[in-house]
Amino acid sequence: MALTDTAARTAKPREKLYCLTATAGLCLEVTRGGSKLWRFRYRSARTANMSITKPETLPKPIQRALNQIAHSRPLLYQAACRDQIGKEIDTLLARGMSHQDAIEPLRACPPTLDPDY
């Protein structure tokens, strides 16, 4: 079941911290003290699982939060591509290739953002 604005506004604190899941890695975390935080979970090449937390400013429509996440996804994809390209260049340099020769194939065919991402 998708998280609604009403459910987000009326979420009460419990004995333990809990999350109300929206979609696409977005959830509303409710602490024991009653604080509400938006948490966005994603994977990066550098770490296995990360999350961005933003203090809750209710009433904030769920759709607006999802739109902010949608704008963040291309940036995360670019960071992952940058990490992968760096590893490829390091591998080529370790094989004895010159820096210019190592980056030439990347200049000819740079990575692009997948429209389905």
Image (cartoon, rainbow, N blue to C red):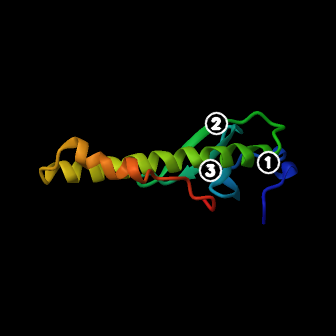
The residue at 74%/46% (across/down) is 67
Q: Which residue is mark 3?
A: 16
Q: Identify residue type, mark 3.
A: Lys
Q: Earlier in the sequence, mark 2 or mark 1?
A: 2
The residue at 81%/39% (across/down) is 60
Q: Would you say the residues marked 3 and 2 are in contact, meaning their CB atoms lie under 8 Å apart?
A: no
Q: Identify residue type, mark 1.
A: Ile
Q: Residues within 10 Å of mark 2 (few under 14, many from 20)?
A: few
Where is the N terminus found, in terms of image quarters? bottom right
Residue 54: give its label: 2
Q: Nearer the viewer, residue 108 or 35?
A: 108
Residue 38, given in percent of the width and then of the height, sits at 67, 43
User: What is the distance, in whole Å, between disc 3 and disc 1 at their CAs?
Assistant: 23 Å
Q: Secondary structure at mark 2?
A: strand
Q: How many marks?
A: 3
Q: Residue furthest left?
A: 96
Q: Is residue 58 above or below residue 111?
A: above
Q: Secondary structure at mark 3?
A: loop
Q: Residues within 10 Å of mark 3 (few under 14, many from 20)?
A: few
User: What is the distance, in whole Å, between disc 3 and disc 2 at their CAs?
Assistant: 20 Å
Residue 30, visible in the rendered structure: no
Residue 13, given in percent of the width and then of the height, sits at 72, 45
Q: Which residue is mark 1?
A: 62
Residue 7: give its label: none
The residue at 56%/51% (across/down) is 41
Q: Identify residue type, mark 2.
A: Lys
* Pair 3/2: label in front: 2
Q: Nearer the viewer, residue 80 or 92?
A: 92
Q: Nearer the viewer, residue 31 or 80?
A: 80
